[in-house]
Image (tube, grey):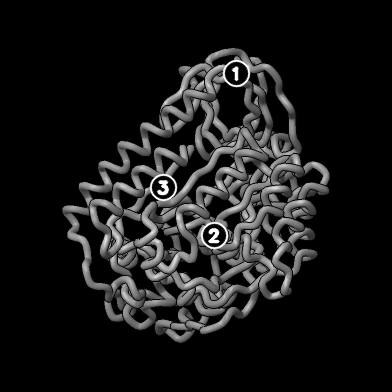
């Protein structure tokens, strides 16, 4: 049989992105070759179920594949992830041309299910109710040389009334610290200089071990890994956030001064209705202690507008807290019903018109705060990890992009004679600020070459113009 191509499209959060890297790794291990669009022999949609329009996006995309499938004999379509776990047979009812449906607990089954569907000439559905294999043990194909996602746990033990994740991902399962550190050491050996520790609630890590201080210990252990330049994590929960994590962040040089701390609402009444298990006084107290120990820390957050029962007074509480908290970035979302969540059955649902109007007002305040906080960075010298995600070389303006230690996006100038690769570190002086990025139009002050940059350069030398090392064995891990 001729070599078959595949394309994986990811919807949703970074945990979904982590899972998609495993899906790609398994398909490549099974002999498939990656395509750059849905014009492939196998198209995999890794779905999200958090937002209301997640269903519409999926079925809209599946609808567009029908004609393509007619033109490509033997083409297969697979749908996996959270929406597949939730909808199961509904997917085949609405899109009977789908070949495989798999859930959040059995990513490792995809190659077998595809082959079974092909041989039997009928759709395959496999949805498990419990985790079969921890995702990080599966083969991986990363889309970045210098950065990697590392899951420390899956699932969630919280019961937020707006969230369906615990239902779809199950109870929290923690990896052993030794396994996590072994994975990070292997990644560093491959050229990775930055890792993102992932979990639905990273700071409850250790619940299975009975160790409430396990996450802080893990951060400190990461600090002992040679050549690991940067450690980030997402997402903590305010109810489990402890001062030992703040101390670990402050005392471990490669743990970045950036904290993403979801707020969801600035109203104590709404937080109670959400079952968030903390109140605004505790939330602001955490921010105060973080900034006391880590003055350069940037704090980002998530906020939901229009939760059932939210009054204008509740909304103003959120506005006021945003002004007080001074977030570097706030990801704002309009509340949408998710079937299967307690919030969907609550009285006092807010009309879409009111939600939209409040969302616009909140966004205006958030953007103003972001601009004011970014303007404080002008004149500072920052270290930037050059990426091939946020921006590539602009031939006209000779600019590159990357992330500062506090995770702010930075665009900077460089001279044509300077060889700067994704993964390298540069120091620049910030000269301009906008709400969503910083700019340096002065010469680079310092360049630190990295192993990741060397690997990127080698990839270009063998003809890969975008520097993503397709076919380089070190990018496919088992």
Going by the image, does 435 lie left or right of 416?
A: left
Q: Is residue 131 above or below residue 404?
A: below
Q: Where is mark 2, residue-wise?
A: 237
Whether residues under marks 1 and 3 lie with C-beta atoms below 8 angstroms apart, the answer is no
Q: Is residue 451 above or below residue 215?
A: above
* Residue at left offset 36%, top offset 55%: 267
Residue 41: quadrant of the picture: bottom left
Q: Where is mark 3, residue-wise?
A: 331
Q: Position of residue 244 (x, y in %)?
A: 71, 54
Spatial CA distance of label 1 from label 3 is 27 Å
In the picture as drawn, the residue positioned furthest to the bottom comes out as 120
Spatial CA distance of label 3 from label 2 is 16 Å
Query: Helix, strand or loop at disc 3?
Result: strand
The one nearer the camera, 477 or 135, is 135
Q: Position of residue 404 (x, y in %)?
A: 60, 33
In the rendered image, the quadrant that contains the N terminus is bottom right
Q: Where is mark 1, residue-wise?
A: 429
């Amino acid at each position: 049989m001729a070599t078959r191509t595949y394309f994986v499209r990811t919807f949703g959060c970074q945990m979904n992105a982590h899972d998609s890297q495993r899906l790609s790794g398994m398909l490549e291990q099974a002999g498939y070759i990656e395509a750059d669009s849905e014009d492939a022999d196998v198209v995999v949609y890794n779905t999200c179920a958090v937002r209301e329009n997640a269903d519409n996006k999926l079925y809209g995309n599946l609808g567009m594949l029908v004609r393509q499938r007619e033109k490509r004999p033997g083409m297969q379509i697979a749908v996996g992830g959270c929406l597949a776990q939730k909808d199961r047979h509904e997917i085949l009812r609405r899109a009977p041309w789908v070949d495989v449906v798999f859930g959040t607990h059995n990513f490792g089954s995809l190659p077998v299910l595809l082959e079974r569907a092909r041989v039997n000439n009928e759709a395959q559905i496999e949805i498990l109710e419990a985790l079969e294999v921890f995702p990080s043990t599966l083969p991986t194909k990363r889309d970045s040389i210098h950065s990697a996602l590392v899951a420390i746990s899956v699932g969630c033990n919280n019961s937020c009334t707006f969230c369906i994740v615990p239902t779809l991902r199950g109870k929290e399962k923690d990896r052993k610290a030794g396994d996590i550190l072994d994975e990070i050491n292997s990644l560093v050996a491959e050229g990775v200089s930055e890792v993102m520790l992932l979990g639905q609630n990273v700071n409850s890590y250790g619940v299975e071990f009975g160790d409430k201080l396990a996450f802080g210990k893990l951060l400190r252990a990461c600090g002992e890994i040679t050549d690991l330049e940067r450690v980030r994590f997402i997402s903590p929960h305010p109810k489990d956030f402890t001062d030992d994590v703040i101390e670990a962040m402050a005392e471990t040089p490669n743990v970045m001064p950036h904290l993403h701390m979801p707020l969801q609402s600035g109203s104590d009444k709404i937080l109670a209705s959400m079952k968030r298990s903390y109140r605004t006084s505790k939330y602001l107290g955490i921010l105060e202690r973080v900034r006391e120990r880590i003055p350069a820390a940037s704090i980002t957050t998530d906020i939901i507008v229009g939760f059932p029962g939210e009054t204008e007074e509740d909304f103003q509480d959120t506005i006021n807290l945003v002004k007080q908290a001074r977030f570097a970035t706030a990801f704002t979302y309009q509340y949408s019903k998710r079937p299967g969540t307690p919030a969907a059955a609550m009285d006092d649902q807010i009309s879409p018109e009111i939600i939209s109007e409040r969302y616009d007002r909140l966004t205006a305040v958030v953007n103003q705060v972001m601009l004011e906080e970014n303007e404080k960075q002008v004149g500072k010298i920052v270290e930037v990890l050059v990426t091939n995600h946020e921006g590539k070389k602009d031939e006209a303006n000779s600019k590159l992009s990357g992330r500062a230690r506090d995770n702010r996006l930075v665009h900077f100038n460089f001279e044509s004679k300077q060889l700067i690769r994704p993964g390298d570190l540069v120091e620049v002086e910030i000269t301009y600020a906008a709400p969503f990025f910083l700019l340096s139009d002065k010469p680079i002050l310092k360049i630190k070459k990295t192993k990741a940059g060397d690997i990127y350069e080698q990839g270009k030398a063998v003809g890969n113009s975008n520097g993503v090392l397709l076919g380089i064995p070190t990018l496919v891990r088992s």
